[in-house]
Image (cartoon, coloured by chain):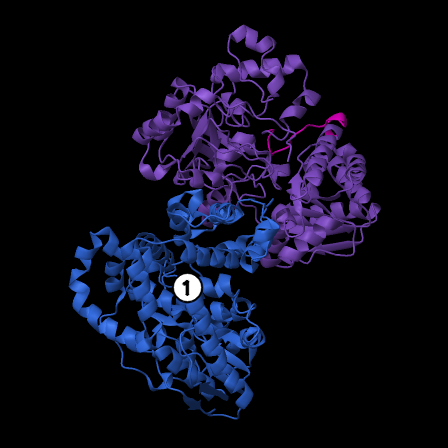
Amino acid sequence: MSELIAFLEPDRSVIARRAAIIADLADLVPASSLITDARELVPFDTDAFVSYRRMPLAVVLPETTTEVAAVLKYCNRNGIPVVPRGAGTSLSGGAIPQEDAIVIGVSKMNRILEVDLPNRCARVQAGVTNISISQTVEADGFFYAPDPSSQLACTIGGNIGMNSGGAHCLKYGVTTNNLLGVKMVMFDGSIVEIGGKALDAPGYDLLGLVCGSEGQLGIVTEATVRLIARPEGARPVLFGFPSSVAAGACVTDIIGAGIIPVAIEFMDKPAIEICEAFAQAGYPMDVEALLIVEVEGSDAEMDAMLGRIIEIARTHGVKTIRESQSATEAALIWKGRKSAFGATGRIADYICMDGTVPLGQLSHVLEKTSEIVARYGLRVANVFHAGDGNMHPLILFDANDPDESRKAEMAGNDILKLCVDAGGCLTGEHGVGIEKRDLMRHQYTDADLAQQMRVRAAFDPKWILNPSKVFPLDGRNGAYADETGETAGKTAA
Amino acid sequence: MQTNFTAEQLADPGVAMSEKILRKCVHCGFCTATCPTYVTLGNELDSPRGRIYLIKDMLENGRPADEQVVTHIDRCLSCLSCVTTCPSGVDYMHLVDHARIHIEQTYRRPLMDRLTRRMLALVLPYPARLRASLHLARLGRPFAPLFRTVPGLKPVAAMLDLAPASVPAASPVSRPGNHAAAAPKRGRVAILSGCAQPVLKPGINEATIRLLNRIGVEVVVPEGEGCCGSLVHHMGREPDALDAARKNIDAWTREIDAGGLDAIIITASGCGTTIKDYGHMLREDPAYADKAARVSALAKDVIEYLASIDLPDPVNGSGLVVAYHSACSMQHGQKITTAPKTLLKGAGFVVKDPPEGHLCCGSAGVYNILQPEIALALRDRKVRNIELTRPEVIATGNIGCITQIAQGTGIPILHTVELLDWAYGGDRPEGLPARATREQRAVQPS
């Protein structure tokens, strides 16, 4: 398949030194942490953005920050690109390697180091899964708020890289709002700590810069995250609508009325069918669109908020309103929603878009999305964080059909441009990765991008960290490179 | 996920099936999180997604299996936790089954590995041979620490460790025969005697037959039954597995044709998963496909059967605190999750769910012999989690788990049906200590 997205041209001189590099790495990490066999490297050639694949030079799975530091120091000194990897669940290709790169995976660094309830925080290694933090403190009545749909598997390190969100971020904010500190290895192997248990750190908001930097400013090996007390109760309620437009307008009005539930999730009919088939959550099947609205607090608080939401929903012609009757039912409602992407695999291959739009544009963008996908002769399922205006159209296609694959990518690009043109943004929570890299020009001017690249270069002067990602390849040798004297790689032809 | 097979490759039914399975995988990575070996080793190569990719690469390129692929497939427990987790419905079970057959056909294992596997295949499925070996093992036990220091002999050490200190006498219920209902008859079932279980814990089938008879179910132990084949099936020795399957299908078909059967009762969930798959395993065999499908449809775990009929009120409501350990073959293989706990509660037990219940105990057929290190790490983790619930007894539905977990804890472990038989009027199961007091429970290790 001819690919729409290019990678940096691999550095042949690095590939030529492969044997020597592997021998050197063997001195830095235990044998069980070094993968070099050609067969064994294949499973690391992609992440959840599976349409693109590149073999890495080698994979290391360090067990300590010191080992990460030793490998990074070595790679920087020898000009070898590095691609950080958490659980490899990125939907934007953030963890896809390249032929001349060493993958540093944090999957063996999976321990919870400290739970500090008086300070409402936990200190964890970068490879712990998102959900395991909440599971660890559940009995004490706490949880970690950001909850990406992949929370079962994705790592906190990857969440920080992508500033991940999730269904419950409407009320609690995304990763950056719940991160208190990191231990990070810099490009040269030096180890820094940014932030800590206190609520604010002196000086520039470096933590804010690191969170969402897609592994280009350093490799986070430990994180201190905020814990939140569990509410007294929580209740997801299903609202079925006769049309997507009505559901979208209802979301706009709920938020516009100053009501902030914990979550407002949207599913259109194709998404409802997919999720119901997997989870059997009892979603209404006779509606065109579904909102899952979760309220929390005391019974009185939940009743009051729900009353207002129901009133608004009625003005939009809501057809079905169903409250979950038990904890099991509530869990199933969320299981269906959170498995939506994977469950789509039952009927087709898909790519998942991640644009955000101002809430007032929700209905308009949904309509246009359908038009775009129809124009390419494909199907779409919409399942997304409506309260945040974070759209996730799933474009369905057949990966064994090169023409369809290409059309799916093109439709995706058109949808993301639509989001930007509607006043939104290319990425809500999945990150730019390689997927949206070449669309960055649609969002930013060259001057904007050059400025961002200067910041990046301040952290990683040789551009060894995840170099093929985020910034369009063809603009890297312009004004920005002239100043620093460094070139950020050449585009593959 | 995109696949790349030629039409010629797809002419092979095994490859064609694998291709269909691979097409469903979207590489989302959810499966990694609940995989016992990934959780233990932290390497994607030892996760379902990694293995799926290794298998895909091997099959697409039409390559014989090699040491690397074999290492990671061998480490798979076939616990099927990934199948429960997978939102896309990837049929990992049949994919890894196919990979194991491919390995067996195309890869020559190192000598010691070959000998160990051959020996297991020749001994375990045959009760008489197993009984004799266990007597021998008692003599060999003092040498286990020595064997453990030699890499090729680790499985031998693991076997010696697992061998019980004493071997119970053969039970009369393993012999073919009819056990009449002791109450107005409401059903007729066959029971699988099996291979290892009647040697290690004959009390399980004795309790099952007693209980079923008491509630009006006639139980027949058919002539000609044997091992279900799962031990060799999981080693990729498919011809042996299919022979075992055909032998059982013949035995049960005779019973179906003679007196009719409402169910084929299985008391080891590991066997149940395989017998329920006979229909698939023999789908290409015109002489057996239909019969196999019929047998698979009739196969029921004893718990599943008990849950489907009305039970009287329990006689011995003990209030004993039971930690229920769900065998992987029960919860992931057969999707039987709540029924055992509902039955135990209904019979008057207090049931506890240990944390991380989805993770395997490391038994997994002969896994604890072939992969002793990972099996031990998983056993210790399982025991820790079970002991957190401070139970007086552990209940589970699979002989492998019973043997494995018993090695790591002082808390008695029984088959669920042994507790149910007692609750519904049977004798107090052997191995169950007198009711522990609250004080005694408080000092149990946790």
In this rendering, is residue B428 above or below B392? below
In the displayed structure image, the side of residue B41 where residue B157 appears, left or right? left
Secondary element at tag 1: loop
In the displayed structure image, the side of residue B73 where residue A92 appears, left or right? right
Q: Nearer the viewer, residue B156 or A484?
A: B156
Is A476 one of the magenta-colored residues? no
| Mark 1, residue position | B237
Q: What residue is drawn where x is 79% and y is 46%? A: A313
Helix, strand or loop for the magenta stretch, by majority: loop
Q: Which chain is purple?
A: A
- Name the quarter where the C terminus of chain B is drawn: bottom left
Q: What residue is drawn where x is 56% and y is 37%? A: A90
Evaluate whether residue A36 shows in this view: yes
* Amino acid type of the residue that numbered disc 1 sits on in the rendered structure: Arg
Image location (x, y in percent) of residue B257: 55, 87
Q: What residue is drawn where x is 69% and y is 46%? A: A293
Image location (x, y in percent) of residue B5: 58, 48
In this rendering, is residue A47 above or below B148? above
> Badge 1: how crowded within 10 Å, few (<14), some, or many (20+)?
many
Stretch of the chain drawn in magenta? A419-432
Q: Quarter of the image holding residue A60?
A: top left
- Name the quarter where the N terminus of chain B is drawn: top right
User: Which chain is disc 1 placed on?
Assistant: B
